[in-house]
Image (cartoon, rainbow, N blue to C red):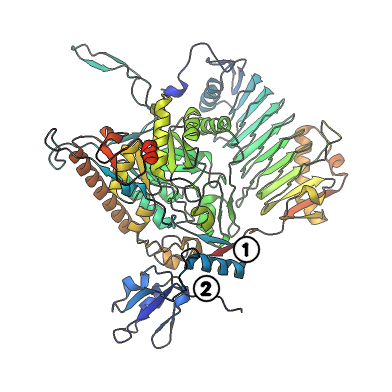
Amino acid sequence: MQQSFVQPEFRVKIDYDKCHKCGRCVQQCGWGVYDFNERPVPHDEKCRACHRCVTFCPAHCITIEKNTLAFRDNDNWSTDARKAVWKQAETGGVLLTSMGNPKPYERIFDKLLLDACQVTNPSIDPLREPMELRTYLGRKPDNVEIVPDGNGGFKLAEGAGVHHNIKLDTPIIFSPMSYGSVSLNVHRSLAMAAERCGILMNTGEGGLHEDLYPYQDNVIVQVASGRFGVSPEYLQRGAAIEIKIGQGAKPGIGGHLPGEKIDREVSATRMIPQGSDAISPAPHHDIYSIEDLRQLIYALKEASGYKPVGVKIAAVHNVAAIASGIVRAGADYVYLDGFRGGTGAAPAVIRDHIGIPIEIAIAVVDQRLREEGIRNQASIIAAGSIRSSADAAKAIALGADVVAIGTAALLALGCHLCQSCHTGKCSWGITTQKPELTRRIDPEWGAERLTNLVHAWSHELQEILGALGVNAVESLRGSRERLRAVGLDEQTCRILGVKPAGL
Amino acid sequence: MKPASIAPPAGVIEGYRYVAPAVECDGATVRMDAQGVYFQQLNDAVREEIASGAKLIRLSNVNGQRYIGTGLRVSGVKIEVEGTAGNDLAMFSDGIEIEVFGNGQDGVGNTMSSGRIVVHGDAGDVLGYGMRGGSVYIRGDVGYRVGIHMKAFEKLVPVLVCGGKARDFFGEYMAGGMLVLLGINARDDSQPIAGGFLGAGMHGGVIYVRGSVEPWQCGAEVAIATVGEEHMAELRPVIEDYAKAMGMDAEDILSQPFTRIAPMSHRPYAKLYASM
């Protein structure tokens, strides 16, 4: 075989003085880094720096270092750019990667700061006073009709109020990740956590495994272009239905779940043959226009007894007009996925160079829907990427109703962001279907960690709201006056509808 | 309570009225007059009648109402449609039998799980998209993107037979099941039996075409072959069933040779990528 020019990215260092020679690292590594010949012998080129071996080494004698191999400095031809060319010259392939865009584009969330009350109006202590995070996902009525209650007061008129909305205990939900791209134990963990937190998980486009039926009231079922696992039963089980048009990590392209990830259970859930590729075409071939989208939305409503139907799109240049069309087509929510959103597999060239930031997308969509007087007709879910409760609070202040977390949820389950989901060999048992790896996630353990994360972020959101002097997340929604920008240019501030700090 | 987005507006919507159809019951047979009735009222009435035990529902004066039979999960129930059924006929359906005495429009049998649809006329685009079970028989011509991404799973093997000619993208992305194109009951003799991109991206299932197709009409992922005896064993019962449903002569249909189009790989894109 020809010698590859691409040198290992990492160096696996073992302190053999401390090493127990127990072979735990050999057993833990999903990438096959280690041979064992009286002691573990690492093959650096296979290492993904996922730290599974490091975490489980009883002697703490393993460390992973960057391969610091020097290249002649060249700001234009980065080491990664050189390696990519060599790789493609060797293989002729489209470079495939996973998880979100890692490139150093500007992170707008990190240039936005929230307000707080001082002196002139009191802040609120959420530990001792009520602080409402409850959020309703779905269409809100155009007006509120009230009638006298007979006791000198008023009550909602019969039939007035919200209908077909989903009550969320906190404005944080789990983003769509399909069974197939992640393991069934990940799906179980997400579903159990969603039920405990009073929120939603999302099947992604891989169908709903029957083990999740008990949690179906906390599940959004997704309909994507491949229509995998979509049956009337599937539509009738979900709490809401989501039409997936696009994904922030790969706007405008479809997906291929490789045949080797399609085992018996995945094939049964997707209702496709074992071992052949699951190909999701780039577009839905029954949606070539907003009118077609409306037709599908109402087909799904007809088939499900008028459940809420949302539409997920990638944040792209013309996102405001597209979102307006989606709302006018009858969607109950619009899910915006920013260009940093994660993926189980995407061509690097697409992931790293297409789309727009979620912060901009939220602001322009919220603004456009308000200007058109249709903001009440649909909720906005924002994702891609929400890294903390602070990002969530800023997204809500920019105009989102709810945020969705995918990467953060996987991090809670052990993901170390090694960007190798597409290999199907995840050592943490998350993005793999190999039974010896998937059993590493106990759903009960996973659900507890996810519940902890959502609860922790919810407490933090309450603290932020208290500092802002408001007692409900409703009062922060779209309240861009409570944001200030530091170091953003004037044009971006104008687009965001946010003043620079000091004004 | 209906959601506000479809609350009854006064008067006419899209040429239809927001009224329940006139219903006549005769045992398990129900007649409904769909004249001018909005799709929602029509389909609500159909669902109600099925829930209360109807086995045969005859819809008369249908004129483009959408979603007839959409999302229905029943077996042993038949809907007969007189007129032109609207878009997404039997979409997401699982077990219903529908016979249309007229034309179908776009999306007939879209993402259908099982059941049987017979259309004694032409049908439009995206016929049988994502279909994974049951059978759809069309007497005449069909539009673009027919049988896209049809798939199969274990006992669920969808069959779609078109008696006339098809436009571009017939069987694109096809992952399972059987598509049959006869070219007999066509409106235009000067057209080729199929457009371009036939079976493009196909990675499962099989397409049978009565007569032949040229390589330029087909996608790069398929192989074109003549039909041998072993293949006639799977095609013959389908043609016989179709001929019976359409009142045609099966031997007549089978009197000409067929061409078989099948994918060269179940994983057409396996070598496209290089892992980072």
The amino acid sitting under disc 1 is Lys
Which residue, as the protein is rendered here, is positioned at the far bottom?
A: A38
Tell me if A40 is positioned left or right of B79 in this view: left
Residue placed under numbered mark 2 in the picture = A6
Mark linked to residue B33: none
What secondary structure is marked by label 2?
loop
Question: Who's the residue at 62% across and 63% down the image?
Answer: B271
Tell me if A144 is positioned left or right of B1 in this view: left
Tell me if B146 is positioned left or right of B47 in this view: right
- Badge 2 crowding class, 10 Å Cα cut-off, few under 14, some 14 to 19, many 20 or more, is some
The amino acid sitting under disc 2 is Val
Question: Who's the residue at 66% across and 54% down the image?
Answer: B203
- Residue B27 coordinates in the image, percent (x, y): 59, 21
Q: Closest to the observer: A358 or B46?
A: A358
What secondary structure is marked by label 1?
loop
- Residue A428 coordinates in the image, percent (x, y): 39, 65
- Residue A455 coordinates in the image, percent (x, y): 25, 48
- Residue A193 coordinates in the image, percent (x, y): 32, 49
Residue A216 visible? The answer is no
Count of picture labels: 2
Q: Closest to the observer: A473 or A231?
A: A473
Residue placed under numbered mark 1 in the picture = B271
Badge 1 sits on which subunit?
A: B
Q: Closest to the observer: A380 or B124?
A: A380
Residue B214 visible? The answer is yes
Residue at mark 1 to residue at mark 2: CA–CA distance: 20 Å
